[in-house]
Each structure stands twice: as C-alpha cells, then as structure tokens.
Image (tube, rainbow, N blue to C red):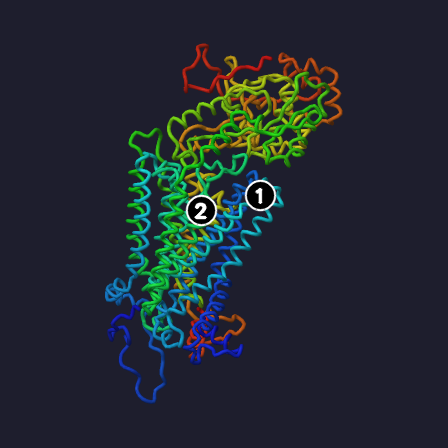
Amino acid sequence: VVVASQPPNILNPEGAPPAQGQPVRPARRSRLSWLRALPLLARPVTVTMPWVTLLTGCLAGIVYLAVMARLVGASRSPLGPGVIRLAFLPAVAALAFVPRAPFRPLTQTVPVPAWVAPTGHLLLAVPVLAVTCWAQLRIIAHTIPPHVLGHPPAVYPLIAQLTGWCAVTVAAAACTGRSRYADLGGAIAAPVSFAAIALACYAPITSRFLAEPPATPHGVTIAWYAVASAAAALSCVAMRDRWHRYARSLHRRSPPGPAPRGTNERTSASDFGRQG
Amino acid sequence: VNIHTAARSTGDAGGPGLTGPAPGRPATAALSLAAAEASLLLRSVLLLAGLVAGGLVIWRAVSPTELLWWDASWQIGYGQVILAVTVLAAAQLAAGRPRRDGMRELYDSFPVSAATRTAAQMAGLAGVLPASVLLAGTAAVVIQARGAIGTPAPGVLAAGVLLVIAAGAAGIALGTRFPHPLAGILGALALFALSTESRLFDTYGVAGGGLPWLFPWTVPDPGQLGYLPGPLTGYPPGGVHAVELAGIAALAAAAALAVTAGRPRHRMLLAATGIVAAAAICVSGAAQLQPVPAAGLNRLVSAAVDPVRAEHCTTVGQVRYCLYPAFGSLLPAFQAPVRGVLAEIPARPADGLTIAQDLSLTLDDPSLAHGHTGQQLARWKAELQTAPASTGTAPAIYTPVGSWPAPRFALALRVAEWAVKFPAGGSPGTGCVPADQAREAIAIWLAITATRTSPAQLAAGQNLIGQRGAGTPSIAVVQGRPVTLWTYPAQYVPTAGDAATASAGGGAGVFPAGPQTTATGFLLAESMTSLPASRVERVLDAGWPVWLNWHTTDARLAAALGIPMPSVSTGVSPPPATAPGPGSGPPQAPLCTT
C-alpha cells in the first residue's frame, strides 16, 4: 500500500483547521499540488513494486527460451518467432499483477491521486520488460546460423506485437482493478489478456491485420501500435476512474451528489465475500 | 466461501455441518467439501472458457483434414490440453485461497483439518470429469457424424481425460505451496508449452525420437498420423501414455497432501503412493521410448511401395477403384467425380482406368523410425524410392491418403486429363505443360462441370496467375517461351513427405504427377462454363478426335465456341536462346506432345 508520509503543506496547504462553530469547507488546493509529493513517493512506490512477481515472470520466459535454444542448438536450426512469443507470455502474465492498487478506497482519500502508485509501478516495469525482450531476442539471434542464406525476419513487428500485448494486459488489469474482482487482479487480467491475444492471432477477422502472415510486417506493426495506443488510453481512463462507479448492481444507483458514506464498504464487503 | 457452502449444504441436509463439531467424521466433512469444491470448479469461468476454447481448438484441428480416427483421437487431446491448462490455473487458485487471502488462521479454526480440506479439493477434481468427458464425447460424436474412417481409440480418449485430472492435481499441489496466482498461470503456461513445443524435439531430432511421447501431450511433427492407412501399433503409444498421466496425477496428489498431512502414518502412506506413482511414470516412460515394432513398419512400407496389392479393388463401370481396407466407405465419394467426367466425354480411351490410393511415407520422422538400425532404415528407404509417389509413374491415378475429401476437383481433373489423353506420370512437380492446347481447357471444363465447382471457388488458384489478385504468378519456360501456370485450389496436396521437407527448411511441396495446368487453359475453361453445356457438348462431339490432338490450339476451340480468346501476360521477357543456368530464371518444363 502506498501511503506516503504526509507533510503538512500537502495535507492542509491552506492553513489551520477551521475554527469551532464555523462551517466545515473542503480544503481547496491546487489541482497539481500533489506533484510536490512525487519525490517523496519514489521510495514507497519502488518498495511496493511487485518485483518478485515481475522478475519471476520475466526470468521464467528467459529460462524457457534458453533451454529451448540449448536443446535445438545442436541441430543448428533457428528457433521460430512463435517460440519467443510463447516465451514472452510469462512476462505478460506477471505484468498483469503490477498495476494493482490494494486498498484503493483508502488510497484515493489521500491528496495524491490513487493512480500515481500503479502508474509508478508500470513505469518501473517498462525497463524490466525491455531488458527481457532484448535478452530473448539475443537468445533467438544466437540460434541463427552465421552463414544462413537470406535476411532473418524483421524484429520490429515482433516488438510492436509484444508492446501491444503488454498494453492490452495493463488495460485488462486496470479495468479489473476497478471491478468487484479487484482482489483477484492479475489472476483475471492475465487469462483475459491471453484470450484477447489468442483471438487477435487466430480469429479470421483480426488475424488479417494482426498476424503475420497474412498481414505485412508494416501492417502488423501499425495495427499493434494502434491497439497499444487504444489500450493505453483505456488504462488511463480506468486508472483515473473511481471505485464506486463499479457497484455490483447498476439498477441501484445512488442519487446524484456525493455517495453516501458506507457505500464503498458495503460493496466491498459483499464483493469480497463472493470472491471465493 | 467454500467452507461455508459446504457447511450450509451439510447443515441443510440435517448433517453435522462444518460449523458444528465434526472431528469424528472427517470423511463426511471431506465428502461435503469435495462436493462443494467440485461444484465450484465446474462452474468456474476459467473452466468454462477452457471448455469453449478446447472445442474450438479441436474443430480447428480436424475440420480441414480427412478424418481418420487414429489421428483425430490425438487431435481431441489437444482440446483437452486447453481444458487442462485452465483447470490447472483454477485448481491452483482454489488451493492457494487460504494463504493468498491471509485467512489461514481462520481456516485453521474450523473443525476440518487442512489435510481434509486438501483431500477434499483433490476429490473435488471429479467436478472437471463431466466437462472433460463432455468435450471428448461431443468431439467424438461430431467427428463420427462427419464420416471419420476407423474407430475411436478409447485409450487415447481416456488419456485426454486423465491429462485434465493430472493438471488439476498439479494445480492443487502448486497452490498448496505457492499461493500467488502467478504460480498457477506459470504452471498453466508450462503445461501449454510442454504440450505444443514438444514437437520441436521431433523437428530438430533432439535427444532421440521417442522423447516427445513423454511430454503431457504431443502429436509427432512432421505428423504422419493423418497420412497412415490405419493405426500403427506404438505410434503413438496411447495406452502406455495414459498410465504415465495417471502416475503424474497420483504423484501430484501425493505431493499436495504431503504438505498438509500431519500424522506419520499418513505421511508414510503418501510416500508409498508417491513411490508407486513415480515407478509407474518411469516404467511407462521406458515403454514409450521403445521403437515402433519392425513388423508394423514393414507392413507400412509395403503398403506404400505397392499400394494396389495392399488395397481392396472394386470394378464399377469399367473403372477399377482400389482403396485401403479401412477406406471402403469412401468408394461412393470416389465414384461421383469420376462418373461425372465419364458421362460428359463423347468417347472413352481404350486403355482402362484405375483409381487408387497411395501412401506418402517418410522415415525421416524420428518418432517413427527411432530405435531401428541404419541398415534397416536404408533398406526401407530404398524400397520407398520405388513407390508410385516417388517415381511418378502412373499405372493408375493415385490419391494420397489424408487428402480426401479436399481434392474432388483434382481427381476429376486427373480423370479428365486421362480422357483427353494427356501423358500420365512424370516426376512430381515436373509434369509437362500443355501450352496452347485445346484439350487442356476441355479437361478443366470437364472437371468443373462434373464436380459442379463454381469457377469462383477456383479463384484462389486464379490469384496465382496475377490476373485478378495480388499473388505472384508461377511461370514455366516451355520451348523457350514463358508460360503462366495455374495452380488450382487443393492442387497442392500436403503430404507427410512435404511436412518433413518443409520442417527441415527446404522444398516447396509436391504436386501430383501430371500436366501442369496453364492460366490460359483455365480462363478459356471458365469462359466455356458461361455457355450452355449443350452447346459446348455439341462442339466437342462434332470434332472429338480433333480436340484430342495436341496440335489443336486454344484459339481454334475459342473460335468454334464463339468466345473471345483470353489473354494472359506473363510479365516475363522471353529468355535468351542459350539455356539459362540453374536458378537464373523460371524453370524449364517439357511440352505435352502425346
């Protein structure tokens, strides 16, 4: 849980509490005043980052690829791109657990927006994923015989595809985090992402644009970056969204105005009780 | 939640319930818990998604191929792999629930021990049995309804169900130690990778040919199962593999229970179970590494070298049909296109017509040939060199096993080519080219008419001529002149040999022996289909011997029918007078001159 130390200048930037007998007004502060707390948040964000989960997923794929490369190395035959895609799936699965924001109802009451911590985790995950991708590409490159005829397949469509997978996974995780299944988080987002990836690759309609062949490398690259952009936008919207928008019954919406106290607790309690 | 469900169910039924003291009846509590776990597992979204995805995988695997039960039984297993992957993840989630939610102390406060809960979860795997059996049963019914050849292999189908159970047990074992959901996902990915990438061990010939059978599920690559004329003992070893999967399930169950078992007597029992399971895995693994019996391979090679001798032949309407014993039910399907062509031609050639199946067999498949001496393999390979598929000699029109029912048009065209007296045979892929010969268009028109194939359905091949699509035209140089070829759909018949060649990184494929059809011939035939059939028949009847002459040109046929002559541009400039070197241009091909 990211709960930063709360300096007075952030908690109550406009001065002392209201005097006795005066009406309580919500403290007005600048919309960007929380930016001053970012340096203080760096450490807790780094500490609460699920490093073990992410590194386990990344290392699992690298180890798998290294074993496969070792096994087929004797035959001097290159590993296909399908193997590297499969090897990247554990990292994608681990990424699904990164943007989780436990105790969201609590963290969104502090002055710093609740999406800062998950975003910080994602930013920390980016270089790890990049290094994983680089390592896997290096392993694949080592399996290509030195004097092979012709050019090896282009890497940029593969990178675009993996980027798209990551973005879809983050979007799925962010959306799951705003749902009543937030407690399961990545356990739901990862299978959902895998299903989306499988559909993109094997459904006749989508595979025409997202799979190579029949799509061209340029087409695949553009299509996957478009998917990644859309997924990133969806992630932003989902991360900024509020918990109570995802009450279990849409028919029992509270009237306009501030939600009654306890709505979140009731929803959370009932939801947690059904998660099995 | 499951504890409470079980408690409610027992309480409602008048039993002691889990909330009350029930230390003396752990079996009852375990059964109640197992029923609740089974119900939850069966209703799990993951499992239901796996069921749907498994069905799609099976459909995708079997729908484009000839349905042979000795192959389809293993393809059904790939659907079970998908189900097993989801069951593993769901079981891990369920088993890791107490520790993941930080409620271990709460669970421990219940009168049911952790060991009983784990045993109940293991028994709850019975909940996936209906899903797995439903998947296998539905697939079997659909495949049988579509006219599959042979009979289902019960051992292989049972192995698929055992795979799902073993995956569930492994998921529980994983969940009792690693409650984080990522552990289940990684386990599921590992199972998926082991089942799909095990083909690499065959493709790259890693560590011997029998090794892939030890993986949870595998179909050999290059897959020859779908090209065999019947089941081959030990390829793959289905029954023994089921024993291995049962052993894995038992071992995983013992490992899961060992975490929570408290009493020494229970631990001893679990240790003994684990030892027996490990022994069963080892013994079954050793059995799977045994080579395919030489007698079976001898019969297979003989069936490939001299197909007609191994087949049952039937003569119907002066046409001899020879089919492998298991394929007798296909006789009417073979007769239809042949009868259609023969009904259209004004006069039949004097020589007889034989339609036969042949077998494209390769012994470069390590999982098929491993364990046999090099001398024995060399002898078999030498024999296979004399097979019709290798020599291209054609005393009969051959249809490879595993390609039916795709090439109905191909069979009709081969019969039509026989009817217009094209030379049969030639090495595969190097048949003669009937450039500017009217009989070629007539043969294609006969095949289209006999099979009622819409010319639009042949568009895939038409794309290759570069006229209406973006495909690259296939060019052959015939007597110094470039000719655009036409590859009709299903002309390329993938065979086991192709699969072996392609996986080795070479070869484009084997075309059936016979003339290479040209784009001009197809376009002229397509124009002929736009005319009334009676008008075409009248023109053909009037000068049948003339049309069969290889000197009769397409233009003459077009003029007789009153249709414009199609023009095809090769986009290739004529080669120089000197013969080009190998690889310096389009391939040379002989002209059909008989």
Residue at x-position 34% and y-position 36%: A78
Q: Please give the count of numbered marks on the rendered protein.
A: 2
Q: Is residue B426 visible?
A: yes
Q: Secondary structure at mark 2?
A: helix
Work out how far the residue at label 1 is from the one at label 2, CA to CA, in angstroms: 19 Å
Mark closest to the chain's N terminus, 1 or 2:
1
Residue at x-position 47% and y-position 32%: B297
- Have a look at marks 1 and 2 and say if they share a chain: yes
Q: Nearer the viewer, residue A223 or B486?
A: B486
Percent x, y for residue A263? 44, 77
Q: Secondary structure at mark 1?
A: loop
Residue at image mark 2: B240
Q: Is residue A258 visible?
A: no
Vertical order, B92 against B418 (above or below)? below
Q: Nearer the viewer, residue A263 or A68?
A: A68
Q: In the rendered structure, which amino acid carries the disc numbered 1?
A: Thr
Q: What quarter of the picture does the N terminus of chain A occupy?
A: bottom left
Percent x, y for residue B594? 60, 13
Percent x, y for residue B89? 42, 58
Front tag of 1 and 2: 2
Residue at image mark 1: B151
- Disc 2: host chain: B
